[in-house]
Image (spheres, helix red, strand yellow):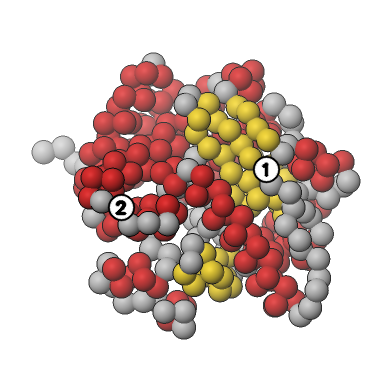
Amino acid sequence: MFPRPDSLTIHRLGALAAQRAPRKLSGAVVALGSTVASFLAGDRRVIVERNIERSTGRKLSSSEKHRAVAKTFGAYGRYYLDSFRLPGLSAEEIDAGFSYTGFEHITEALEAGTPPILVLPHLGGWEWAAFWLTQVHGFKVTAVVEPLEPPELFDWFKSFRESLGMEVVAVGPDAGPAVLRAITNGSIVCLLSDRVVAGATSVPVRFFGEETLLPAGPATLGLRTGSPLLPVAVYFDGSRHVAEVRPPVDATRQGGFRADVQRVTQSLADELERFVRKAPEQWHVLQPGWPSDYRALGRPVPEVLRELA
């Protein structure tokens, strides 16, 4: 038997195929693979079902769950396909496949000398928008991302994203100073903020009607630097990508710093929830995020979430 390829090899082969194969063929392969993956996903399928019901606000029938989960895994597959295609596309091709509303909030912040912090959910294809900012407009972009295992896979993704013109910072103790330097140097900062990853400071919020934790980083940075906190989502719309940039969340000091961080994070949670409800089947969060998720999976609730359970 042939040895099973490791995760780094799989991603490299996927990137090569996305860049070399015709778009229709690679799209068909991703659609088929995503459908198969949705059946074999185990606990991840359970989480996707729960997230779909959270974001639609109702219980779904078995057939509705089946269709919704298949679409979610399809969107997740497309995220990788579109991202891997980016290095082979020109700035003109990127621009032709992209539209937006609210872009003035970004340009106004840059013109005022306070580069914005873009706060995003894991929705649609955010990397397309980041590449559009760097390649079409020539803006500096810094993205804070989750460390991956094995480290070689993270290094490959870091190099891949940097080839798109982004600076990449891993979540961890060095992330804060790196982001502050980026803001000082005029860089737009992108923070995926709809779930907590290891090494990130968090605060309790109400998100989709349940208590959970979300990253404290965006609120902390906004309060300390004065950079506008702009909620942003990037949706798939047919073969195109559509971005929505919302007005800045109020991040002025109103009380104690910890209370302000919690207040601002709750405001951001409300904005992220609004985005996800518009396209719940494009929300590719596959990890448990609420105490009830762990109970549904028959797992112990992590200590950091027990007080919320």
Q: Residues within 10 Å of mark 1 (few under 14, many from 20)?
A: many
Which image quadrant for residue 298?
A: bottom left
Query: Of helix, strand and loop, which one carries label 2?
Result: loop
Residue at (44, 23) in percent of width and height: 19
Coordinates of residue 93 in the picture (x, y in percent) = 59, 19
Q: Is residue 24 above or below residue 289?
A: above
Measure the C-alpha gap from mark 2 to mark 1.
Answer: 30 Å
The foreground one among 140 and 252 is 252
Residue 229: mark in rendering: none
Dot 2 or dot 1: first in sequence order is 2
Q: Position of residue 259 (x, y in %)?
A: 70, 77
Determine which residue is flagged by label 1. Answer: 245
* Image quarter of the C terminus: bottom left
**Of circles 2 and 1, which is in front?**
2
Residue at the spot 35% in from the left edge and 67% down from the top edge:
293
**Outermost residue, bottom direction?**
307
User: Of residues 298 and 217, which is closer to you in this image?
Assistant: 298
Which residue is pictured at 19% across the width and 41% down the height?
Answer: 3
Which kind of residue does numbered mark 2 sit on?
Leu
Q: Say what amino acid the circle numbered 1 marks.
A: Val
- In this rendering, is residue 192 above or below 5? below
Residue depicted at x 72% and y 57%? 249
Residue position for label 2: 60
Looking at the rendered image, the quarter that the N terminus falls into is top left
